[in-house]
Amino acid sequence: MSLRRSSAAALAALLALAVLLGTSADDGGQGQPIVARVSKDASTSLYTIAIKVGGVPLLVDLAGPMLWLANCPTPHRIIPCVSHDCDDVSTTYRPPGCPKPNLRGDGPCACPAYPRNPVDGRCRSDDATTITLAANAMDGQNPLYLVTFRAVGSCAPGELLESLPAGAAGVAGLSRLPLSLPTQFASLLKVANEFALCLPSGGDGVAVFGGGPFQLLAAPPVELAERLRENPLPLLKHPYNGGYYFGITGIAVNQQRVPTPDGVFDLDAGSGTGGAVFSTVTPYTALRWDIYWPLRNAFDVATSGIARADKVAPFDLCYQASALTVTRVGYAVASIELMLDGGRNWTLPGASSLVQVNDNTVCFAFVQMASSMPAAIDSPAVILGGHQMENNLLMFDLVKETFAFSGLLLGIRTTCSNFNFTMGSSY
Ligand SMILES: *[C@@H]1O[C@H](CO)[C@@H](O)[C@H](O)[C@H]1NC(C)=O
Ligand SMILES: *[C@@H]1O[C@H](CO)[C@@H](O)[C@H](O)[C@H]1NC(C)=O
């Protein structure tokens, strides 16, 4: 049995090699997309992706510039200072205050990189290197066969892992910059430079790199990618970082627009301040005070009939769980709408707007942004966090510079934990 399995694995590896070799560099998008499990860490409420050999998890950082791995072996492969890859490494964002590299007296010049912990903001300098990744090719419904490849990333000292989920070996940066995972996949695997992210609220969610169809189990199973690609919204460019910024024109509670001052949601293209950005390292959506308070107060009024409970940090508005009724899309409360470009709305029903914090208490799942939040470079106005992204399929197209969202999947009777990870048959 295990012999059969290993010869099957060898065949799969050959097939994978054939896919890699059989596609010329300039015919774009001939390779097979790849799929990886995304898990939620219960104690930090952060997400990891199983993309390393052996399924070792890396923290998912949507705004992260590159890939880094703690505790590289000695010796490890270095990247020469004079090389195309080193040009890419040095053009990625170098966080202010990051220590300068120790220059070595002997040997070839090793390209320095600046791995940063996106949760607590600490940054170090270390060697750029190549990191071996492994993930399954997929056909839109199932994983097919294992593909391994080397991506450019950085080593990092082990201490940089503090504050990440236990067991995480580093960070997978998914930003719009040249060394992010989706961009490297696109060139290594000859697939489209787009990816889909479906964050779970528990169990295993899923990430897909390289386009193609995307099916979740439901009764009957649903293909979601095609319709989403037909309804994209523009991403906005931040002047200094590779985050996924998008336009918000207002927020409504129960179809009533929340009064906010003019221009509060705008991204200042010069200074990079303001705007709305997706973040997988911010567990709950964080709003600048001039957006948080109007929304919180409008929600307070719209839910005035529901018995309150003592506040549980970091939340400011909590309810008695027993006073709430549960529907298919979470607790029955006033819905919140994020009003986006082109008159589109992203509706946040109870499952997205509230969170159960203990047996008796459910809280309004938004926080006021701290003025010096380390997760937030350049102070956005809205950081759309993990809880509000959970059980939504999000698709990002790095070439067209667009994104698309499914809305809460519970509404169509499925979740991000319904990807069928059973190996399919590959021909
Ligand atoms: C979006 O939400 C606003 C506020 O609730 C509402 O006025 C508007 O009609 C909605 N637009 C669509 C297309 O549903
Ligand atoms: C999951 O995929 C496998 C392989 O294609 C298939 O045999 C199985 O029926 C699928 N599971 C469900 C619940 O559809």
Image (tube, rainbow, N blue to C red):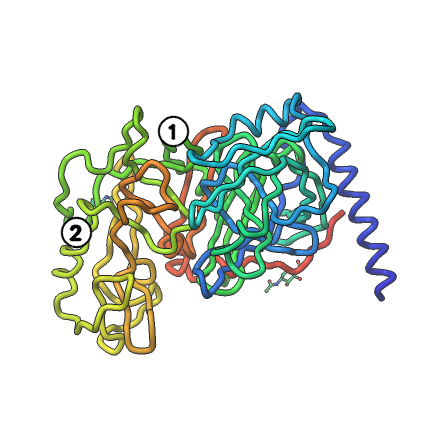
Q: Residues within 10 Å of mark 1 (few under 14, many from 20)?
A: some
Secondary structure type for disc 1: loop
Residue at left offset 48%, top offset 37%: 175
Residue 183 visible? The answer is: no
* Residue 147 horizontal/vertical position (percent): 71, 45
Disc 2 residue type (three-letter): Trp
Ligand 1, by image quadrant, is top left
Residue at left offset 44%, top offset 30%: 401
- Residue 106 placement, left or right of 323: right
Quadrant of the rendering where the N terminus is positioned: bottom right
Using the image as rendered, state which of residue 223 and residue 160 is in the foreground: 160
Circle 1 sits on which residue?
Answer: 237
* Residue 135 horizontal/vertical position (percent): 66, 49
Using the image as rendered, state which of residue 116 and residue 380 is in the foreground: 116
Circle 2 sits on which residue?
Answer: 293
Using the image as rendered, state which of residue 334 and residue 153 is in the foreground: 153
- Residue 266 placement, left or right of 284: left
Residue at left offset 74%, top offset 49%: 426
